[in-house]
Image (cartoon, rainbow, N blue to C red):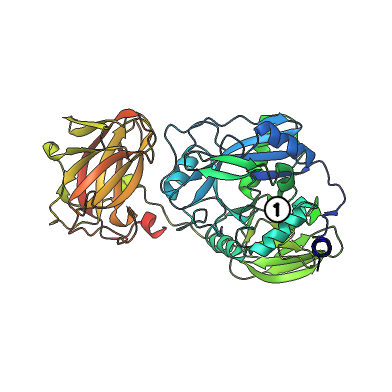
């Protein structure tokens, strides 16, 4: 067979297997808007500027874009602004030890780098008035997947367009590249499969508490090389798939109470509030666009929408409707299990135990759902366990670590640490060495004998400025020993904190979940580059340090 014949056969095969073009649907009302969530620019590992992104979004008929460049939240977010008719909203994607978290709704810079343990990042974002979404939780790439529990995050990505291709066979990807040259957005979406693991994750979380879900475009508009840095940077070899191509794959739809006002701050507030409360749905627009779905719960004259809770023990009717196309199948799911379906509409009457419902719209011969709604929780609200404030936890003192001369400085050269004692408190004046993060730290350590039996430590701490410090137990072994740590937030107001041993996390792999008290030989307060920039200087005070026994598990611990 000649080369020409082979080439012709390949062209015919590509043409025969070409994914269908996105089906055009009727326009929607002005108060129904669509936008792209999770987009990177050249401020981190994307190839284009915010202006480039806005221009592509306008060409894709989007009304808003949420930028999520990598960082540690110490950069002041850009205020919302309109560009090329598109509302641009700034957010940040933060690296944690569990994976990546997108922080939305922040209006100011964090006074210290956010990161480290995910639960700490969530706590800090909430303190600053924002909210968080777990990014690409089930990515086939280990470095991008989520590890550990949900850390109290407010939402999760049920779909991530940049993750869907990563588990495909080479032949499938080669064919997708050929299709991309003809129908780029459709070719990208053709490798989308039903993200079963992410749906199961979302449904599991939603059984315990309200958790929103978004579809992440995760657009970078580049093929290139990642650079190991924070925030993540990249070298672009080819600016593909383009922002325009990615904006044709999946979007978030929102039905606002009124059309956008063109006041950037007002409109951004309305969009973020809708997303945060779950009043939005995802549309794989590479299948059909623009796409609209209605999902409500009702009892008598009361109606609840997506993201709301129907707190009643009476029967509740759930209904989801898709006006077009005619062959769309609507499915209602309760805690992930299908309970009703129908062409164009599905209805189910809830009775019994509380449950969370969501809806999907599916098109024939498509693996991925076309539209996915956020949930509606139905049933009486279950009482939340009381969260015992750290400051109110009482215990029996086993040993008071109150002999100031026993505190000693530990540090990474050429970082500096100096101790002083006054008024019953010991202070650490620290200066971390400048340059790239390379293990800089300054610490104060108190020796332990291993003879005391305790299950918690209590102390009072404050600092010159808001920051995070690490409290660590150390078991001698090798150069640095085995360590368990827990980060705590401190500021200028003295705070009394109690931490159980089970609140600590092992530093490194292969260690027990909790430090073995009989082997622990020191308790340290550490300032390091997890939450402090190299070159920073300051002072932190600690007093009233005691080893204690609490006797019973705290509500905070049992909730983990």
Q: Is residue 465 left or right of residue 54?
A: left
Quadrant of the rendering where the N terminus is positioned: bottom right
Res 51 visible = yes
Q: Is residue 232 above or below residue 559?
A: above
Depth check: give the residue in front, 357 or 298.
357
Residue 415, located in which quarter of the rendered image? top left
Q: Quadrant of the C terminus?
A: bottom left
Name the residue nearer the viewer: 533 or 556.
Answer: 533
**Toward which corner of the image does residue 368 lie, by quadrant?**
bottom right
Residue located at (15% from left, 56% from top): 452
How many numbered marks appear? Answer: 1
The quarter holding residue 468 reads top left
Pointer 1 residue:
282
Q: Residue at x 47, y 56 (%)?
A: 384
Q: Looking at this rendering, what residue extends furthest in the front direction? A: 2
The answer to which of 310 and 168 lies nearer the viewer is 168
Any part of residue 285 in sight: no
At 45% from the left edge and 53% from the top edge, which residue is drawn?
98
Question: In the rendering, at what x and y percent does residue 260 appear?
Answer: 75, 35
Mark 1, other Cα within 10 Å: few <14 / some 14–19 / many ≥20:
many
Side (left or right) of 281 relative to 133 = right
Q: Nearer the viewer, residue 474 or 391?
A: 474
Residue 327 x %, y %: 85, 65
Considering the numbered disc 1 on the image, is that residue within a helix, a strand or a loop? strand
Instruction: Residue 481: give x, y in percent of width and height.
Output: 23, 52
């Amino acid at each position: 067979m000649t080369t020409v014949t082979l080439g012709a056969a390949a062209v015919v095969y590509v043409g025969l297997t070409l994914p269908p073009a996105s089906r055009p649907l009727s326009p929607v009302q002005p108060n129904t808007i669509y936008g792209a969530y999770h987009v990177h620019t050249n401020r981190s590992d994307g190839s284009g500027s915010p202006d480039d992104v806005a221009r592509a979004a306008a060409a894709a008929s989007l009304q808003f874009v949420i930028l999520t460049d990598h960082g540690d939240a110490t950069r002041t977010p850009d205020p919302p602004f309109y560009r090329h008719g598109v509302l641009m909203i700034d957010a940040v994607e933060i690296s944690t030890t569990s994976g990546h978290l997108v922080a939305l709704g922040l209006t100011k810079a964090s006074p210290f780098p956010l990161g480290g343990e995910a639960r700490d990042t969530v706590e800090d974002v909430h303190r600053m008035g924002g909210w968080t979404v777990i990014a690409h939780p089930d990515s086939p790439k280990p470095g991008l997947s989520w590890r550990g529990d949900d850390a109290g995050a407010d939402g999760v990505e049920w779909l991530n367009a940049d993750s869907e291709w990563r588990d495909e066979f080479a032949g499938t990807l080669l064919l997708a590249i050929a299709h991309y040259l003809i129908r780029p957005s459709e070719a990208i979406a053709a490798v989308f499969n039903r993200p079963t693991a992410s749906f199961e994750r979302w449904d599991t979380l939603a059984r315990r508490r309200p958790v929103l879900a978004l579809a992440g475009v995760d657009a970078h508009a580049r093929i290139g090389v990642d650079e190991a840095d924070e925030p993540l940077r990249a070298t672009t070899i080819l600016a593909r798939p383009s922002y325009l191509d990615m904006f044709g794959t999946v979007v978030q739809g929102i039905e606002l109470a009124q059309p956008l006002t063109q006041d950037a701050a007002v409109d951004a507030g309305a969009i973020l509030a809708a997303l945060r409360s779950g009043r939005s749905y995802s549309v794989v627009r590479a299948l059909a666009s623009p796409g609209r779905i209605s999902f409500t719960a009702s009892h008598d004259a009361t109606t609840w929408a997506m993201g709301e809770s129907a707190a009643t023990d009476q029967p509740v009717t759930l209904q989801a409707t898709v006006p077009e196309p005619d062959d769309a199948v609507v499915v209602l799911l309760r805690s992930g299990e299908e309970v009703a379906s129908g062409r164009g509409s599905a209805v189910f009457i809830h009775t019994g135990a509380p449950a969370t419902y969501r809806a999907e719209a599916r098109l024939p011969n498509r693996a991925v759902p076309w539209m996915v709604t956020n949930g509606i929780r139905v049933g009486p609200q279950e009482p939340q366990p009381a969260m015992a404030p750290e400051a109110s936890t009482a215990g029996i003192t086993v040993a008071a670590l109150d002999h100031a001369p026993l505190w000693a400085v530990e540090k990474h050269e050429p970082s500096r640490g100096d101790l002083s004692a006054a008024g019953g408190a010991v202070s650490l004046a620290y200066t971390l060495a400048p340059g790239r993060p390379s293990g800089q730290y300054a610490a104060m350590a108190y020796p332990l004998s291993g003879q005391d039996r305790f299950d918690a430590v209590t102390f009072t701490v404050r600092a010159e400025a808001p920051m995070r410090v690490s409290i660590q137990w150390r078991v001698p072994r090798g150069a640095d020993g085995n360590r368990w740590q827990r980060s705590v937030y401190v500021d200028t107001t003295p705070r009394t904190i109690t931490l159980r041993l089970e609140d600590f996390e092992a530093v490194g792999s292969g260690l027990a979940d909790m430090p073995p008290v009989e082997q622990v030989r020191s308790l340290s307060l550490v300032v390091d580059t997890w939450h402090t920039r190299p070159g920073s200087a300051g002072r932190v005070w600690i007093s009233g340090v005691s080893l204690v026994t609490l006797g019973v598990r705290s509500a905070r611990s049992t909730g983990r």
